[in-house]
Image: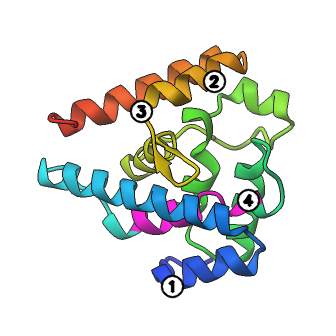
Amino acid sequence: MSDKLPSRERALQLLYENGCSVNVVNHCKAVAKLAVETAEALKRKGLSVDLELVEIGALLHDIGRSKTHSVNHAVEGAKIAESAGLPNSVVSIIKRHVGGGITPSEARALGWPSDDDYVPTTLEEKIVSFADKLIKGSKRVPVEVTIEQLSREAKPEAAERVRKLHDEIAALMGDYP
């Protein structure tokens, strides 16, 4: 495992090498664009944010979709990232980006390794999860679209976590558009 982040080009190459579709890659690029814009806005507000980690983590957040399109893509993606020798910071972004975070009880119900944490805790993890919830396909959507979808899927806890995450990032940004 390296501490060195891959370049943007290498991150995109990893997506293709692992069999991600063009749609998944385009989604990852759109999430990365919004995540970097968000991180830059937070940096202007005086917060300490690793812009490179945000970009690379956002580009690779859905690498597990090369194996499955279920929520399990987070765990599968973390395995791919670990086997590629990516830094723990990137593995954590991949593992923690879904549903505004997955609680320990939800992780157990999904059969995920229970000795792990699936809730975004660092600012970089939160930014990528936040940006992912505002991109459907490769288009930006209001957070309400994601919240309504989670509610329709009978996932009220996830909808609430997404709302809280959105509100937290928006409050940090101050003048969120």
Q: Residues within 10 Å of mark 3 (few under 14, many from 20)?
A: few
Q: Which residues are magenta?
A: 53-65
Looking at the rendered structure, the kind of residue marked 4 is Gly
Give the residue number, with chain letter if any, for mark 2: 150
Using the numbered discs, state the Cα–Cα distance from disc 2 to disc 3 in whole angstroms.
14 Å
Secondary structure beneath dot 3 equals loop
**Residue 8 at x, y percent in the picture:** 47, 79
Percent position of residue 79, x then y: 76, 63
Q: Assign the N terminus to one quadrant of the image.
A: bottom right
Residue at 42 percent across and 23 percent down: it is 164
Element carrying mark 1: helix
Marks 1 and 4 in Cβ contact (< 8 Å): no
Q: Report the amino acid beneath label 3.
A: Pro
- In this figure, which residue is indicated by the disc labeled 4? 64
Q: CA distance from mark 4 to mark 2?
A: 20 Å
The answer to whether residue 161 is left or right of residue 112 is left
The answer to whether residue 36 is visible is yes
Label 4 or label 3, whichever comes before in sequence order: 4
| Quadrant in which residue 94 is drawn | bottom right
Q: How many marks?
A: 4
| Residue located farthest toward the front when viewing the structure as drawn | 139
32 over 157 or under it: above or below: below
Marks 2 and 1 sit apart, C-alpha to C-alpha, by 33 Å
In the image, what residue type sits under mark 2? Leu
Q: Position of residue 65 (x, y in %)?
A: 74, 58
Residue at left offset 83%, top offset 60%: 67
Q: Which residue is mark 1?
A: 9
| Horizontal arrangement in the rendering, residue 64 relative to residue 30 (left or right) | right
